[in-house]
Amino acid sequence: MTDPKRKGGIQSVLFACKYNAIRSPMAEALAKHFFGQKIYIQSAGVKAGRDIDPMAVAALQEIGVDCSRHKTRTIFELRDTEGLNFDLIVTLSPEAHHLILEMTSSLSANVEYWPTFDPTAVQGSYEKELDAYRQVRETLTQNIKQRLSSQPLWSDDMEV
């Protein structure tokens, strides 16, 4: 059996955002839904102190993905418990991107920045706010499927 990592395949992914309460847990749940049998997937945030956002849970439940049991954690907690030795680290917020770049400066880490809208910026009716979370869900779904579908970690046409 050929080792997929030797062919450049992605075996582990970390999604990181500001609080690990909306964007990164949504990305983690979606990636596990689509690729959880093949890829080790985790998420973490820059800051502590928030629980999973109920609107993020609702947006994912609409498509049959459950993240209601997600326990938020910081990048520092993750680093201390299992390290940051992921094949791919995807940052979803500027705060996470800057911190991950600092923390992985001495590692051989593939860090990608996927700027992802913070749906809490939308104010209005429940439906209007939920639409913002749906938009994040759809953007993440598209990006995750495109990036993790049998694509190598590195390829000649990718920027490094």
Image (cartoon, rainbow, N blue to C red):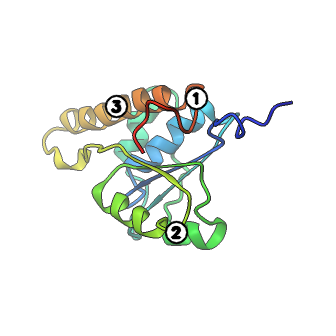
Q: How far across and how far down the image is residue 128, in percent?
A: 18, 34
Q: Nearer the viewer, residue 6 or 139?
A: 6
Q: Residue 83, image x and y in percent?
A: 62, 66
Closer-to-camera residue (95/98): 98
Tell me which residue sits at (36%, 49%) in the image.
92
Q: Secondary structure at mark 1?
A: helix
User: Distance of mark 1 from mark 3, alpha carbons?
Assistant: 14 Å
Amino acid marked by disc 1: Phe
- Sequence-earlier tag: 1 or 2: 1
Q: Which mark is residue 121?
A: none
* Label 1 crowd bin: few (<14), some (14–19), many (20+), radius 10 Å: some
Corner quadrant of residue 85: bottom right
Residue 137, compared with residue 77, is above or below; it is above
Residue picked out by circle 2: 106
Q: Quadrant of the N terminus?
A: top right
Q: CA distance from mark 3 to mark 2?
A: 31 Å
Q: Quadrant of residue 131?
A: top left
Picture layout, residue 88 above or below residue 7: below
Camera-side residue: 67 or 39?
Answer: 39
Instruction: Name which residue lies at 58% across and 32% down.
Output: 152
The residue that mark 1 highlights is 34
Q: Is residue 144 left or right of residue 118?
A: right
Q: Is residue 36 left or right of residue 143?
A: right
Residue lying farthest to the front in this orientation: 156
- Asked if the residue at tag 2 contacts the one at tag 3, i.e. Cβ–Cβ closer than 8 Å, the answer is no
Q: Judge depth for marks 1 and 2 and give the one in front.
A: 2
Label 3 sits on residue: 139
